[in-house]
Amino acid sequence: MRYYISLKYEHDTMTESLIRSESQDKAERYRTLLPQVDALLDGETDQIAALANLSAMLKMTFDWLWVGFYLVKHQQLVLGPFQGPLACTRIAYGKGVCGNAWAQAKTIIVPDVDHYPGHIACSSASRSEIVVPLFNPSGRVAGVLDVDADTPEQFDTQDAEFLEALALRLNRLFD
């Protein structure tokens, strides 16, 4: 299946296609997606533009319930670009899955959000979640990638590995 996205390069606009693997193999879907992420990020300097397209690419590839970014601003996580239902606008340090991933500076996988103490339910349809911290070049957490699914046990260490690889590509956007 092919989706079309518009990428802007300086003064010219060109249409690129997002190729989505139809394989049920999750690793194959990631392997198809990551080179396209590299192409999208090549030369892109605008953080919001890059994060907006990345959230769309992930949503289109995996059809998860919610895919988006929270950015560290004034000692809280503030909602950034996302795809999916309405979301929480601000999350405190150490609160919920996102706030804990920020505080611990590590990826957190939640197989069932009903069993996560302090889970913040931005959407009642969310059943499982993975949150990956985003680091600036000096190693400080600058935001998080948050992904929710409407089924329990959607995410595993394979998702963590690939999403962390994707997150590493974003470091330079967080000067």
Image (cartoon, rainbow, N blue to C red):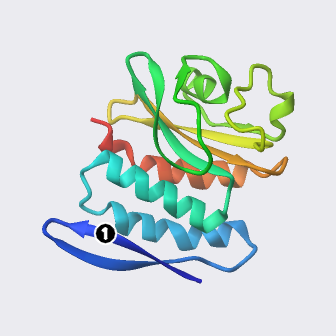
Residue where numbered disc 1 is placed: 7
Along the horizontal axis of the image, is 41 left or right of 111? left
What percent of the width, then of the height, locates residue 19? 52, 79
Total number of numbered discs in the rendering: 1
Q: Considering the image in quadrants, where does the N terminus appear?
A: bottom right
Q: Residue furthest left?
A: 11
Image: 114 above or below 56: above
The part of the image, by quadrant, that contains residue 139 is: top left
Q: Position of residue 45 (x, y in %)?
A: 24, 51
Secondary element under disc 1, as helix, strand or loop, is: strand
Amino acid carrying mark 1 in the image: Leu
What percent of the width, then of the height, locates residue 138? 33, 30
> Which quadrant would the C terminus be assigned to in this image?
top left
**What x and y, as percent, mark residue 26?**
70, 66
Residue at (53% x, 69% y) in the render: 33
In the rendered image, which quarter is residue 104 located in? top right
Nearer the observer, 129 or 141: 129
Could you tell me which residue is drawn at 50 percent across and 54 percent down?
Answer: 55
Identify which residue, 14 or 135, lies in the foreground: 14
Residue 21: which quarter of the image?
bottom right
Q: Mark 1 Cα within 10 Å, few/some/many (few <14, many 20+)?
A: some
In the image shown, does 73 or 109 lie closer to the viewer?
A: 73
Reply above or below: 38 against 66: below
Seen in the image, is 6 located left or right of residue 12? right
Please determine whether, in this image, residue 38 is positioned above or below residue 70.
below
